[in-house]
Image: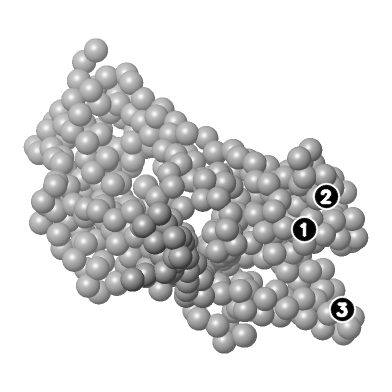
Amino acid sequence: MDDRGDIPGAAGLVLVDGVSLFRPEDQVFEAMLEGFANQQLARNLAYSTVQAREHQLRAFAGHAEAFPWRWSAHLVDECFGDLRAVRHVARSTVRSYQVAIRGFCSYLTDPAYGWVAECERRFGTHPIQVIHEVNAAAHVADSEAEPTRRAFTRDELQALFDHADDEVARKRALGRKGWLPAFRDATIFKIAYGYGTRRTETAMLDAADFGRNPDGPEFGEYGVCYIRHGKAQRGSPPKRRSVLTVWAWTSEVLEQWFTEIRPCFGLPNNPAAWPSERGLRVGPQQLNKRLAGYRDTLGMDPALEFHSLRRSYVTHLIEDGWDPRFVQEQVGHNHASTTSIYTCVSSDYRTRILRRALDALVADALKPTESNPTGGTR
């Protein structure tokens, strides 16, 4: 195989040899992006990941005002200094951009793909790796979420659900069609909390994703929720898991939704659990927007978001004494340390744990022993 190669992403597959280019810089850059996309797809990366990285690479090239064969570590420092100091992007965003650039440069400088020789022939220079250990953002923390992100307290959660229910009643009393979407949104918030699901997991649920749990017959047809669009690991399909119903009210909410309310949407062939008025199903961004609207109306902390429902699920199960391993399996975490990050136990819970431990110490100290048969201390 020559230096132009014939593997996915090779220069020889996206540039025709011997053909003059009208705008060589632009066309070679486009060919590089196409080749990089093919290489990533060959590695089983998701289309969304490939598209996001292309967007990031284009943004960096625009900021640097240079094509990849003229990129340098100096341009990287300028770009990310601007992102952090001026635009105040999150640390995870910087790392995401750098992962895309590092991967792209590794692809371009790999002799198997032929881009080094191609650039030497056309431009008299070649791409280099511009992300190194000295200028790469380190990932040293288990969680890079903003410290303001937290779970709902139980009172806040009840206030949110009550407000969502009130909106349904208000719109229905006024004879407005919007009561059906409002009922759907209220149900979504309750179910996202009731099963601790992520935003996309919630939006992608179908009516067929709920079933009976033989060990929990009291929950009827809604004893288990089957997640088919869980958070995927790199190069892998969406992770599946089953989440058991733990609260009786969850099955009651689902029973009312599927038997009384959802049929009113008039979409018998739509498999989505949460049908949209304009499409197949509600989108994740719509879930964010609606919850944020309710939160702001109630004057709640702006740090509370849709993912806070999942944090609340973990926190409240732990506070109620559920086994941490069970909670870990319910939310689909590979490691217990990840679940612990989500746990935002309240001060009341910590006070109860402390009181229980102190009471146990006192009881142990007062217990009769062989040397002190009457108990107590001397």
Mark 2 or 3: in front is 2
Residue drawn at x 81%, y 50% as measured from the top left:
219
Task: Determine the CA span between mark 1 and mark 2.
Answer: 8 Å
Labelled pair 1, 3 in contact (Cβ < 8 Å): no
Establish if 84 lies above or below 105.
below
Q: Position of residue 66 (x, y in %)?
A: 19, 53
Q: Which residue is denoted by mark 2 in the rendering?
A: 218
The residue pinned by badge 3 equals 172
In the picture provided, is 126 more to the left or to the right than 80? left
Per the rendering, the mark at residue 319 is none
Residue placed at 29% from the left, 62% from the top? 91
For the residue marked with disc 2, what is the amino acid? Glu
Q: How is the image coloured?
A: one colour
Q: Earlier in the sequence, mark 1 or mark 3?
A: 3
Residue 270 in sight from this viewpoint: no
Q: Secondary structure at mark 2?
A: helix
Q: Residue at x 57, y 58 (%)?
A: 321
**For the residues bearing labels 1 and 2, Cβ distance under 8 angstroms:** yes
Q: Are marks 2 and 3 in contact (CB under 8 Å)?
A: no
Please provide percent x and percent y for residue 43. 39, 29
In the foreground, 35 or 175: 175
- The extreme top residue here reads 1
Residue 248 badge: 1
The kind of residue tagged 3 is: Arg
For the point 71% across and 80% down, the residue is: 163
Q: Residue 176: x percent and y percent? A: 85, 79
Report how far apart the C-alphas of labels 1 and 3 lie in the structure: 27 Å
